[in-house]
Image: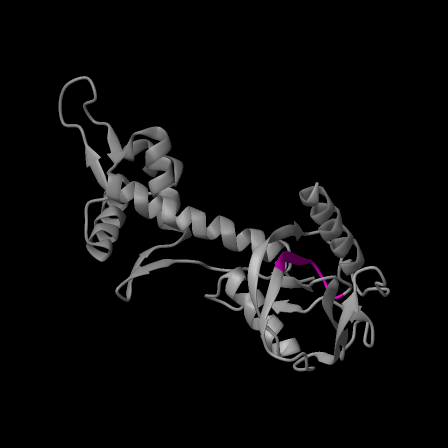
């Protein structure tokens, strides 16, 4: 049986600053308020510990500890604000990576779906790919890196249906882990109104249709529930 291990370190301008051992020294100094106690706990000499701190400071470009030379706190050592920032940066990155590693690097995927309504009709696609190939669904797709969800849904509606639309409001966010058989998908669903364009199938859609809201088909995924949530909201707002 083998275990996979990861070594993480921080660099600044290509210079090694801290990894696990150096970060542990900084953490122990912070917790004990004493360099001598920290060195003792880590099984190193006081001189060696000072040498490590000096190398961290040289690579990072600033003092990482300061010591009180007189008065009540004589002999105490604490991290400088700069040292605190380095330690926090390292520990936060390690915690984040370990969390992802322990979960098999799995993260929910983010998507956006659109309810495009024209009078008493809703714009639907028939899926051209599995899962649910041939079933009706709302137009939508994956959020790309650096893109806002609002831009994503306008783009996806245009790419899948040929219809340019503008957002009216947010219908809701749906995040049930089992809502998509491919994995955990979180989607933001928007109500949109068409501006221009003729409905035509594109991207993952095999067909595009304007369907009467009072003759809705069976939907893929949880899109049937999403549409019913929209209709309930629309009914409440009409009162």
Location of the C terminus by quadrant is top right
Residue 189 counted in the magenta span: yes
Is 142 on the left or on the right of 206, as rendered? left
**Quadrant in the rendering for residue 158:** bottom right
Residue 135 lies, with reference to residue 10, above or below; the image says: below
Most extreme residue toward the left is 70
Quarter of the image where one finds residue 47: top left
Camera-nearest residue between 86 and 31? 86
Q: Is residue 239 above or below residue 212?
A: above
- Position of residue 161 measured from the top left corner of the image (x, y, whole percent): 66, 77
Task: Say whether residue 132 is visible.
Answer: yes
For the rendered model, the colour scheme is one colour
Q: Using the image, determine if residue 149 lies above or below residue 41.
A: below
Is residue 62 magenta-colored? no
**Residue 16: x, y in percent?**
30, 61
In magenta, the rendered stretch is 182-191
Look at the magenta stretch and give its main secondary structure.
strand
Left of 11 or right of it: where is 141? Answer: right
Would you say 29 lies left or right of 155 here? left
| Relative image position of residue 185 (x, y in whole percent) | 67, 59
Residue 143 in view: no
Image coordinates of residue 207 in percent, x first then y, are 76, 80
Question: Which residue, as the protein is rendered here, is positioned at the far top?
Answer: 72
Q: Is residue 89 above or below residue 70?
A: below
Q: What residue sits 43% from the left and 47% below the top? A: 91
């Amino acid at each position: 049986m083998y275990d996979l291990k990861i070594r993480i370190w921080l660099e600044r301008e290509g210079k090694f600053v801290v990894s696990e051992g150096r970060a542990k020294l900084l953490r122990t100094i912070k917790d004990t308020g004493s360099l001598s106690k920290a060195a003792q706990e880590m099984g190193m000499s006081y001189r060696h510990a000072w040498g490590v701190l000096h190398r961290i400071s040289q690579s990072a470009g600033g003092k990482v500890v300061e010591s009180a030379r007189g008065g009540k706190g004589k002999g105490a050592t604490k991290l400088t604000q700069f040292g605190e920032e380095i330690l926090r940066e390292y520990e936060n990155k390690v915690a984040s990576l370990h969390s992802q590693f322990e979960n098999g690097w799995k993260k929910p995927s983010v998507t956006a779906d659109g309810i495009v309504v024209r009078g008493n009709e809703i714009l639907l696609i028939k899926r051209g790919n599995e899962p649910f190939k041939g079933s009706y669904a709302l137009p939508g797709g994956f959020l790309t890196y650096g893109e806002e969800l609002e831009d994503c849904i306008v783009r996806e509606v245009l790419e899948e249906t040929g219809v340019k639309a503008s957002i009216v409001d947010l219908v809701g966010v749906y995040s049930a882990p089992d809502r998509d058989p491919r994995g955990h998908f979180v989607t933001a669903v928007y109500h949109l109104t068409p501006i221009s364009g003729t409905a035509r199938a594109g991207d993952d859609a095999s067909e595009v249709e304007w369907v009467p809201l009072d003759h809705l088909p069976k939907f893929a995924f949880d899109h049937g529930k999403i549409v019913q949530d929209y209709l309930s909201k629309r009914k409440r707002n009409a009162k």
